Amino acid sequence: MAKVKGEIVKVAGPVVEAVGCEGARMYEVFRVGDEGLIGEVINVEGDRVTIQVYEETAGLQPGEPVKGTGELLSVELGPGLLTQIFDGIQRPLPKIRKKVGDFVERGIMLPALDRKKKWEFTPKVEEGDKVEEGDILGTVPETELIEHKIMVPPGISGEVIEIAADGEYTVEETIAVIEDEEGEEHEIKMYQEWPVRRPRPYKRKLDPEEPLITGQRVIDTFFPVAKGGTAAIPGPFGSGKTVTQQQLAKWADAQVVVYIGCGERGNEMTEVLEDFPELEDPRTGKPLMERTILVANTSNMPVAAREACIYTGITMAEYYRDMGYDVALMADSTSRWAEALREISGRLEEMPGEEGFPAYLASRLAEFYERAGRVVCLGSDDRIGSVTVVGAVSPPGGDFSEPVTQNTLRIVKVFWALDSKLADRRHFPAINWLQSYSLYLDDVEDWWHENVGKDWRKLRDEAMEILQRESELEEIVQLVGPDALPESERLILEVARMIREDFLQQNAFHEVDTYCPPEKQYEMLKTIIHFKERAEEALDKGVSIDDILEMEVIDDIARMKEIPNEEAVEKIREIRKKVDKEFDKLIEEAEAS
């Protein structure tokens, strides 16, 4: 197919118009100008095309050439993705730095995967075997934590007529030849290319029934997210979005993490890039980077690449899902991505929608979040993988009624509302329990009941009721003070304080409290609700609320979160026995008097 050529007639920031481009396709990648900047066709009218350029366009002039590549914007998928730091269009930033220094030069394009590095390949099929799309041809130990599976690319099936022996190969060497039913031979390399805007195929989507355990009590117990689910963390500046996402990246029970820094400030992204390589994977003691891919596109990088970066990230996440892994994708933040959409839409002179965002904002957001899911992957072994998407949203001034937050909430099923008032009170994670919600509660209920405790849902619902009751009583307390309330309502305030301070509050920097396993979460909540039930019984028997508030066991309940996780279940059950012992004594004394 002849490559399309044309010339620039107009430059408007990252948007370039060119003529003489007959035969150009939507989303085709073009090289723009004398320096060969990378761009993508976003509009075609006859021989006139509009190209969004993924690099700085300063100095581009009308009359400079544009050339079509015939390719769609694609990513390379193969061994060597993990531990890497890419920009929004999958250029390897550490390699670019080695080559040209700290600043990315225009027109530079290096392959995402190292072409010289040799990988240890172990075949899993033999010559003469029949294979279908998605079947595993062999494995490569990509890092010490993740075994990379070399799969038959989608759209290819047939008989293996050649397979490489055990040994070391580069990603460009042919490791298998498959002959399809028409007799055509397909050479399979260790890597494949995939267009970023096209979701990778799978056999079928499964219901989200298993929770993604994060070790954060307010998330797992109160507002859980399922594996393959979608969640949003909206919050104003300084409320802890980035720390919450880093906690999820570190502790969530996903095997692979893709972290997209989308349009965040350079200093924040620098912190992530410096911190992540230092983090230790708590389950194995190895560096967390060994199962992490970082996509960095800061706010001072070209705006069009920001629009592409979340597609780049989710395509790599889908690739590891296809191997049968559970993948957690963090997008920080989708507001900056939407701002890039707005800027490009303005340059195209499209009709603006609410607050200047394009009319298609909602459908673009939906397209992205729809790519999450727990699926039966392609291949004859019916392996199951998942992509869970957690998107941070940065509403200006913390206003949740703005279009990006509102459109995100229509799509995602979990809403963790970060609250600056809680952050100011040093209550972290600053997730507001009255504004947040999860639509996965019914889906994950069976898992909790089978694996942790039969009355998990009952305890969780009762705790939420107590917190709502406390909120109703707060106005009265501000007017007349807590001492004017009836004893039963003073008890509600005390139990609500326990739930807030001893259960929901969690210290990300404490060596024990940073991660709380589900069994410990269940026992802690059960103990607080048990205390409430015994206290109500004691009030009925004539024990005064002041005596209850002076009980020694209240300090033990406050320290439950610091009990080492391996001893927690046993020790918390002992605290429950102590609750019974102290209440029995109080009731005895009250009855005797």
Image: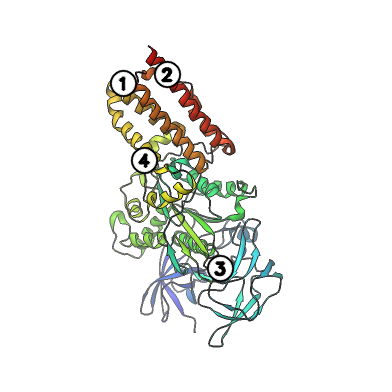
Residue named by callout 1? 481
Residue pictured at 32% horizontal, 19% vertical: 483
Disc with the residue nearer the chain's start (3 vs 1) = 3
Residue named by callout 2? 586
Label of residue 421 in the image = none
Question: Which of the pair 250/183 is nearer the observer?
Answer: 183
At which x and y percent is residue 144?
66, 56
The residues tagged by marks 4 and 1 sit, at their Cα atoms, a distance apart of 27 Å
Disc with the residue nearer the chain's start (4 vs 1) = 4
Q: Is residue 554 visible?
A: no
- Foreground: disc 4 or disc 1: 4
As shown in the figure, which amino acid type bears the numbered disc 2? Leu
The residues tagged by marks 3 and 1 sit, at their Cα atoms, a distance apart of 64 Å
- Foreground: disc 3 or disc 1: 1
Residue named by callout 4? 461
As shown in the figure, which amino acid type bears the numbered disc 4? Asp
Q: Residue furthest bottom?
A: 183
